[in-house]
Amino acid sequence: MIRPRLLGVLLCYNDADILEDAIRHLLDNDHDLVVWDHGSDDGTSAILDKYKPYLMERRLIPRSFDFYRLYQAMSEHLITAYTHQYDWISWPDQDEILEGPDRSAKYDQWIAKVYEEGYDYIQFNNFNFWFTADDDPSIISPLDRIRHYCLFPDCAPRIRSWRAANTNIRLFNHNPIEGKKLPYYFNLRHYPMRSTEQMLRRLNKDRADLEREGANYHYNNMKLAMEQHNMLVDPSSLHVDDGSSELDHSVTYNWRNIYGYGPSKG
């Protein structure tokens, strides 16, 4: 099997608690890494210092740089500097862990198969992993601490992985890539709610006032849900991941209870 040259991309802002897990996962799956830090002030810098020898590129982007231009700027940079050096790009959100369609092989092994078969991009199922009363806050790693999850089936499309030569201007990695789409989905584990303190900071500071023209409205809805104490999901409503069994696709919880269906009316 052909072993494609893999590049991982991370845009960081104040998710230091899960950043090491995200970096290690991509490194363990044979990716070189390009990391831009969008003005983090929470310890992200120290983690990037630790992994400096493993980073192909690390850049500090001032917080004053418009978030809504960030994906375009990174896309243009990848097209100019990296798409001729690499065969495949994986660009998860910082709180996402990418997997294949099942756990019979590692993520990079699945990518090699897709690459060899001539497909150009992959869409992912979004499995939300959520902190619950059954999780132990003393466990440092979110990947070890948070085991309860459920599929979020009607979220915006997660296009997180594609043939490097086909890279286009990314729109929060929801828009398709030109070429042949893989006919089945891969899976990703999304960890937006990792502790009460982390979520309060996210909604009151890190993602506050982010909505623009209907985009990223969900943070306002989540803040309202938090204020109404609706962010605490009963663990019995979710599945439990043992780390080896296949993820359960049955929908037992409606994430729209938290994310909403559109911009909040206040």
Image (tube, grey):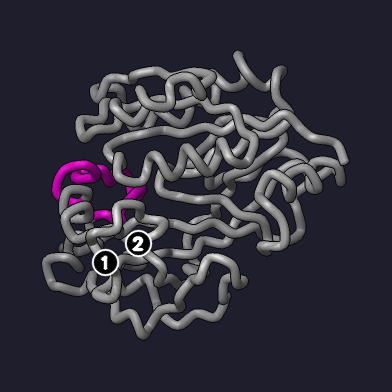
User: How dense is the environment of label 1, judged by Cα within 10 Å: few (below 14), some, or many (20 and up)?
Assistant: few
Q: Is residue 64 left or right of residue 61?
A: left
Determine the CA span between mark 1 and mark 2. 6 Å
Q: Please, is residue 248 above or below residue 28 in the view?
A: below
Q: Is residue 226 left or right of residue 82?
A: left
Q: Quadrant of the N terminus?
A: top right
- Give, as a single range, the part of the protein colored magenta: 203-219
Q: Position of residue 16 (x, y in %)?
A: 30, 39
Q: Please, is residue 248 above or below residue 10 in the view?
A: below
Q: Look at 23% across and 62% down and name the residue there.
A: 137
Q: Amino acid at mark 2?
A: Arg
Q: Position of residue 199 (x, y in %)?
A: 22, 55
Q: Please, is residue 188 above or below residue 24 in the view?
A: below
The residue singled out by tag 2 in the image is 145
User: How dense is the environment of label 2, judged by Cα within 10 Å: few (below 14), some, or many (20 and up)?
Assistant: some
Residue 73 inside the magenta-drawn segment: no
Numbered label attached to residue 136: 1
Which of the 4 image quadrants contains residue 31?
A: top right
Q: Look at 50% across and 79% down and name the residue there.
A: 251
Q: Position of residue 103 (x, y in %)?
A: 66, 62
